Structures are given as C-alpha cells and as structure tokens.
C-alpha cells in the first residue's frame, strides 16, 4: 500500500475547518418568523366576543396557533385543523372565565381563508359546559397590519 495517498492536510485547511466549527450554531440556524397576529371577533347569540389570535399554516395545510378573547369574557384556545382548497375545517377545545365562573367546551366549524391568509371568516358550533344548549355563531380573523 502506498503512503502517498495518506497525505497530511495542510495547515491552512485545518485552520479553515476549525474556524467553521467554532462559529456559533446561531449563525447557521434560521429563526422561524413569528406567527402573525390577527384581530378576532366572534358573534354568538347577539353578543360579540373580541380579542386576538396567532396562527400558522404549514405546507400540508395544518393549522396551529392560539386564541385569546378578552371581551366581554376571557376565552383561551389552541387552534387546530386543516386548510384545503381555501376552506379551514376545525374542531378545538376552549376554556372560558365568565366573571369568575370557569367552563370549557368545543368550537367546531369551517371558514373561508384568503389565499394570503390575511382573513378568515366562517361559522362555528359551540358546545360544552358554558351553555346548557349548543350555540352557533360566526367569526372573523383579520390580520393586523
């Protein structure tokens, strides 16, 4: 076996490799963009609930995010569902604090979503311990500028 194939790397090549290895991983890592914020309005039985939401849609159309309504009651939820052909189908759990009375439930429905995800409008069905009877309503998410 010839030893000519087993050459020692040059000093400059070693220095280059060491310099690259010493760089902080942050130089190579990409920070994902923050999820955009939306104004959120739900109209249910003549009452309007408002707050904010953030959500993202992955390449497969899966939705994830959070919802926080703060007027007239506090409602928290983790958004889910899927957007297909411009229609978001969802079914997610929520909790609500209505003047010190805690309850929970499920929001389900569909919404039309603009191609740029700047707006979503749709219908919801609401069930759970917050109301003795199922409720229905409409909602809109509008991207803040």
Image (cartoon, grey):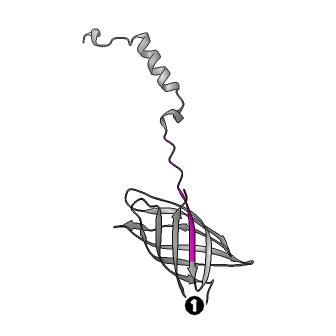
Q: For this rendering, which residue is in front, 113 or 106?
A: 113
The structure residue drawn at horizontal position 46% and vertical position 63%, both measured from the top left corner, is: 63
* Residue lying at 48% horizontally and 41% vertically, measured from the top left: 30
**Picture layout, residue 36 above or below residue 107:** above
Image spot of residue 58 (x, y percent): 42, 57
15 is higher (above) or lower (below) than 45: above
Image quarter of the N terminus = top left
Q: Quick one: which residue is furthest to the front in this view?
A: 145
What residue sits right under mark 1 in the picture? Answer: 133
How many numbered callouts? 1
Q: In the image, what residue occupies the spot 44% across and 16% down?
A: 14
Q: In the figure, is residue 89 to the left or right of 45?
A: left
Left or right: 139, with 114 as reference point: right
Q: Position of residue 47 (x, y in %)?
A: 62, 82
Residue 139 coordinates in the image, percent (x, y) = 52, 75
Secondary element under disc 1, as helix, strand or loop, is loop
Instruction: Give the magenta part as a residue range.
Output: 30-42
**Where residue 2 sits in the image (x, y, percent)?**
25, 10
Q: Quadrant of residue 110?
A: bottom left
Q: Residues within 10 Å of mark 1 (few under 14, many from 20)?
A: few
Q: Quadrant of residue 112?
A: bottom left
| Magenta stretch: includes residue 8 | no
Q: In the displayed image of the protein, which residue is found farthest to the left?
A: 1
User: Which image quarter is the C terminus in?
Assistant: bottom right
In the shown orientation, is residue 119 left or right of residue 78?
left
Which residue is situated farthest in the bottom direction here?
133
Residue at 37% from the left image edge and 67% from the top image edge: 86
């Amino acid at each position: 076996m010839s030893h000519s194939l087993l050459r020692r790397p040059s000093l400059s090549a070693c220095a280059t490799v060491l310099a690259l290895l010493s760089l902080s991983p942050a130089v190579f890592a990409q920070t994902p963009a923050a999820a955009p914020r939306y104004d959120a309005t739900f109209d249910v039985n003549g009452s309007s609930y408002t707050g904010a939401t953030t959500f993202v849609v992955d390449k497969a159309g899966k939705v994830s995010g959070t919802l926080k309504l703060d007027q007239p009651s506090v409602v928290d939820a983790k958004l889910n569902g899927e957007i297909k052909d411009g229609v978001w189908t969802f079914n997610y759990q929520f909790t609500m604090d209505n003047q010190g009375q805690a309850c929970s439930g499920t929001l389900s429905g569909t919404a039309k979503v603009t191609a740029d995800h700047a707006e979503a409008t749709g219908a919801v069905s609401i069930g759970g311990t917050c109301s003795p009877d199922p409720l229905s309503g409409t909602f809109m998410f509008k991207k803040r500028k």
